[in-house]
Amino acid sequence: MDVARGFLEELRTGRLIDDIVASLFRVTTGFGLAALTGIPVGLWLGNHARARVAFLPLINFFRSLSPLAWIPFAILWFGIGDLPTVFLIFMASFFPLVLATVAAVANIPSVYFRVAGDYRFSGTEVLTKVTLPAVAPQVITSLRVTAGLAWLVVVAAEMIAGRAGLGFAIWDARNGLRMDLLVCGMIVIGVIGIVLDRILLQLTKIPSVRWGYER
Amino acid sequence: MSDKPLRVANVSLSFGTVEVFQNLSVEIEHGEFVAVVGPSGCGKTTLLNLFSQFIKPSSGKVVCAARARMVYQHDSLFPWQTVSENIALGLRHLNDNAERTRQLGDMLRLINLEGFENHYPHQLSGGMRQRVELARALIGDSDILLLDEPFSSLDYLTRIRLRNELARMLDKLPRTVVLVTHDIEEAAQLADRIIVLSDRPARICSELRVDLARPRELTHPAVVTTVHKILAELGLEEETRQAMMSPTS
């Protein structure tokens, strides 16, 4: 009952909506930037063996670092607010996405490229009509996994480097000994996590990627 | 000058220390259906890769004087494209949309897959997928069909059915065909000429001709005789006889 009352109170004051919007903005920006840069980098590394040998150890190094280890640097470089959180989400999402895309490119059966050669595909066509659709199912799966990771990180980052957002709300409730608001924040975070995954799940229903999930 | 559409002349090829061919020469006539059989790993697929110019010989000459298309051993349909889109790859040279649609419709009728044009490969059976692969290679302006064990992943009955399908397709759309296969029955049932290769470095053990119209019954005397001859050339009949005579403990 206390949690329900706390939930209504947060809704009435508008703070809950503001926190949800702030957290979602940070996740979509950080995660979106990571996807927009990580997937092309993964495609490039997947197609260039020498670059892969050169850069993969570095990418594995950064992938192994907990994004939370970057918090002091994030505050030092970007202060408090949206930017450090977006940076932390980017750091959490970028490296796994690169690695997943590299692995997906490496798994493309070579016969597809032979067929592309037989039917005289141009270099651009090989990328857009063979490589991209061939890696799409695996990349979508890694997007779902990474989005979950980004949502985990936003809460942790906002606890330390935020002035708003669901993580900050939980931290604030903890400081004010408001366990009802704390549980309310936890429930909202869990529900939004499920909704985000459901949204990304829709990508797996595109007919041209179903093959990756039904074979 | 030779007018043969496919020719390898005095070809030698090595992969590192492994010598695959040594002065091998093969010529394929226009409209001929040639099957290549031989022991596993003797270089049958490599010969096809030479014909398709996918690999270059260490020495010697390879001529492919016409447009060749290959049907591969493993699933090579693009799984993200529908049956129609996969087959239409063979019509990429056509700019006229109406003509593309007409040819595509004709091909779907020929392979008995009308109604499946919007299905994806994973929604089809193995035999249907193989028919789509053949259709993609046959449609449009190809002259030569290079078949690399196209039915090897199918069950025995489907293989027999698809041999008849291929014979029917080639009757409508004649092509020069080179079929690489480990299936001796398949070679005897389909080919005009069968080239039997030896172990590495591969040389031609013998060439057998089958003068019988396609489609051929599997139990037709000419087909059965050819199977016997191929087995004899590969030394398998002798091996079987010796195994039968050796005492069992």
Image (tube, coloured by chain):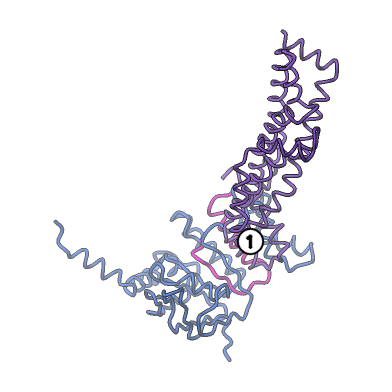
Chain colours: A purple, B blue
Residue under the image location 79 percent in, 62 percent down:
B98
How many numbered callouts? Answer: 1
Residue B247, image x and y in percent?
Answer: 14, 61
Subunit under mark 1: A
Quickly name the residue at label 1: A48
Q: Does the magenta stretch include residue B135?
A: yes
Q: Quick one: SS at disc 1? A: loop
Q: Quadrant of the C terminus of chain B?
A: bottom left
Residue under the image location 67 percent in, 41 percent down:
A143
Q: Is residue B25 magenta?
A: no
Q: What crowding class fits label 1: few (fewer than 14 Cα within 10 Å), some (14-19), or many (20 or more)?
A: few
Outermost top residue: A1
**Image height check: is A176 above or below B114?**
above
Where residue A140 sits, quadrant-wise, is top right
**Image height check: is A27 above or below A6?**
below
Residue type pointed to by label 1: His
Residue B242, image x and y in percent?
Answer: 21, 67
Task: Tell me which segment is drawn in magenta.
Answer: B124-150
**Image height check: is B221 above or below A65?**
below
